[in-house]
Amino acid sequence: MDENKDSLQEDEYQVIQEKIVPKKKNPWKRFGKTLLRVTASGLVFGVIAGTTLVLSGKFLIQRLGLENAVRQVVGIGNDTQAPAPTRTPYPTKTPVPTNSPGTTDTPAPTSFVIDVPEITPGGQISIGGEKGDTPSDSETGEKPIQGFLEMYSEIAGLAGELRKSLVQISAIKEGVDWFEESYETTGNATGLYVGDNGRDMLFLANLDSIDGATKFKVTFANGDSFPCTIYSYDTNYRLAVLTVRLSAVSELEKENLPEQAEFALTDVEVGTPVMVLGNPNGHLGAMELGMVTGTGQVVQVIDDEVLYFTTGITKYADGDGFIFNLAGEVIGIISNTLNKGEKGIITAAAFSGMREILEDTLNNVPRIYCGMRLESVDTVMGGRYSLPEGIYVTEVLPGSPAMYAGIKNGDIITTIGIVPVTGVRQFYKEICSVGAQSVRIVVSREAKGGRKEQTLFMVPETRLH
């Protein structure tokens, strides 16, 4: 009996044992499923990450400043930028050289030539109205007026070539009227193509003409229009740079693109014949002829001064444009604010002496800021008022580095670092060479018993606009 019981328990134990023993699984099948899940998760993550990167690319580029990495530095003049494209030649009269025996003449370079008709000597006119023996035009067969017409034809041809560097800028201002209705007004300005930075086409314009606008459009000479944006501007010198993406104009033929302007950065002389192109008289695309009537005028701006010149051309209230010499070079930009109140004539800010300012504006480089208005103490002023040679401080702006340094109205700055300064332009160049770091400044200040020197230390700031 007991033996049967033990045998039955042993059989039950074996059954139970068979039930609880786990069944062995294939390890390769489990590894394959895990690999499949990891691969699928990676693909989903990659798609989500790629989509997020594309959608946020523009934001990240602007936020991190990466877009500047693809831009090239733009310069003014032959030593810092590629030569401007050769313009289509216009008809000129070129005298035929006379070869001397045994010599070989080297062809002279093409230049702008104006033939002045010769005056026949010997003719006299009396007070009583009786003419002398001077032959009439009909007798000689010569027509002096023809020389003028030919000269003017050449000038008109040059103007036509220079207009290829100009574009029309539509500046759109948005507002709300008394009835809370939105409206837009469109003004026009003249832009000058100065080159590209590898990413954008750059157009120089007068800030006064586009100030307050929120949307912009550029129209080329052939009528093609493209949206544009402000890349940089300078409130001190009233300059603005607008850009059009090169990719937007890539399908245009080369002859439909603006031509790069050429600059003359040398001093302008009185009597220089000039032409004004743009909108000098209230008509878009107009041309005015005249000559430089005054140079060397100076208007003070913050920490610097701007040279401007006057012309004999009648001024239009809202006119703008650029001044060219008859060599086809830009020498200035019309300005209605950078002058000392000249009325009735066109005045222009001269580009001579503004190379660094123009290049910094074209490349959106911050400028040094001290916060003063200055005036040079010339020999006459110094002798009359017993003042030392230097720069007279006419105004110190509130909250400026100059104010924090202790500079006051009426001080005369005589030294920057260890360099004596005698002019405003020299002062600004010295400050720019130091940069945004502490610099020693020696000033002459009015005190009891006469003027006394004081040493101060100023830390200039950098500002974009």
Image (spheres, rainbow, N blue to C red):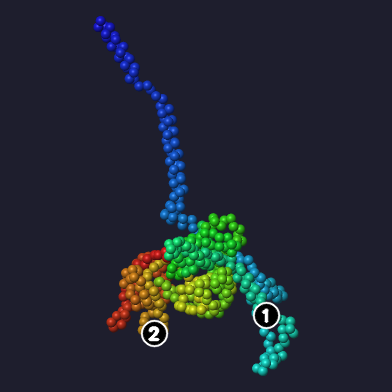
Direction bottom: furthest residue:
128
Q: In the figure, is residue 287 to the left or right of 210?
A: right
The residue at the point 60 percent across, 61 percent down is: 256
Q: Give the alpha-carbon distance from disc 2 to disc 1, as whole Å.
A: 54 Å
Q: Amino acid at mark 1?
A: Ile
For disc 2, the marked residue is 383
Q: Which residue extends farthest top?
A: 1
Amino acid type indicated by mark 2? Gly
First reached walking from the N terminus: tag 2 or tag 1:
1
Q: Can the viewer see residue 360?
A: no
Neighbour tally class for label 2: few under 14, some 14-19, many 20 plus, Cα within 10 Å: few
- Which residue position holds label 1? 145
**What residue is rendered at 29% in x and 12% in y?**
10
**Outermost residue toward the left in this view:** 2
Badge nearest the viewer, 2 or 1: 1
Percent position of residue 432, x then y: 41, 68
Residue for point 69% across, 91% down = 131
